[in-house]
């Protein structure tokens, strides 16, 4: 009889513990914000809206999704010249040094 108890206790634990964990997990409601809303709120805490508006006005590409872009590898940029700028000395046609990232 005692052998059956020692066999049943671990078996019961293996099935009941995961079931209990799953039953206590919080389920999301319809009022919970989406991942994109959460991300926008976090960005708003770090970067003021006026700066985001300036980047958009200058046609700076912003990743506004919840999936980050793949930035693997090395990059070389040459013949950089501004098409728009918020700095008074920058003029269209100026060029900047080549850069390696």
Image: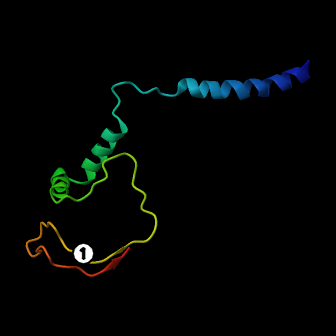
- 37 and 1: which is toward the camera: 37
Binning the other alpha carbons within 10 Å of mark 1 as few (below 14), some (14 to 19) or many (20 upward) gives: few
In this view, the residue farthest toward the bottom is 97
- Please identify the quadrant where the C terminus is shown: bottom left
| Residue in the picture at 14% in, 66% down | 84
In this view, the residue farthest toward the top is 1
Decide if residue 65 is on the left or right side of residue 96: right
* Tally of numbered tags: 1
Decide if residue 65 is on the left or right side of residue 87: right
Tell me if residue 55 comes above or below residue 17 in the rendering: below
Decide if residue 69 is on the left or right side of residue 92: right
**Quadrant of residue 78 within the rendered picture:** bottom left
The spot of residue 76 in percent (x, y) is 37, 75
Give the colour scheme shown.
Answer: rainbow
- Please identify the quadrant where the N terminus is shown: top right
In this view, the residue farthest toward the left is 88
Question: Dot 1 corresponds to which residue?
Answer: 80
- 19 and 99: which is toward the camera: 99
Decide if residue 39 is on the left or right side of residue 21: left
| Residue in the picture at 85% in, 25% down | 6
- 83 and 55: which is toward the camera: 83
Tell me if residue 26 comes above or below residue 98 in the rendering: above
**Quadrant of residue 7 within the rendered picture:** top right
| SS category of the residue bearing label 1 | loop
Tell me if residue 87 comes above or below residue 1 in the rendering: below
The spot of residue 5 in percent (x, y) is 85, 21
The spot of residue 97 in percent (x, y) is 26, 82
| Residue in the picture at 46% in, 68% down | 73
| Residue in the picture at 23% in, 79% down | 96
The spot of residue 85 in percent (x, y) is 14, 67
**Quadrant of residue 71 within the rendered picture:** bottom left
């Amino acid at each position: 009889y005692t052998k059956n108890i020692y066999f049943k206790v671990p078996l019961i634990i293996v099935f009941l513990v995961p079931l209990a964990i799953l039953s206590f997990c919080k389920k999301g409601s319809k009022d919970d914000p989406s991942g994109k809303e959460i991300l926008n709120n976090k960005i708003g805490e770090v970067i003021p809206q006026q700066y985001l508006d300036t980047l958009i006005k200058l046609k700076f590409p912003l990743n506004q999704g919840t999936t980050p872009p793949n930035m693997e590898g090395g990059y070389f940029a040459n013949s950089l010249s501004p098409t728009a700028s918020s700095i008074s000395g920058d003029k269209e046609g100026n060029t900047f040094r080549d850069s390696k990232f």
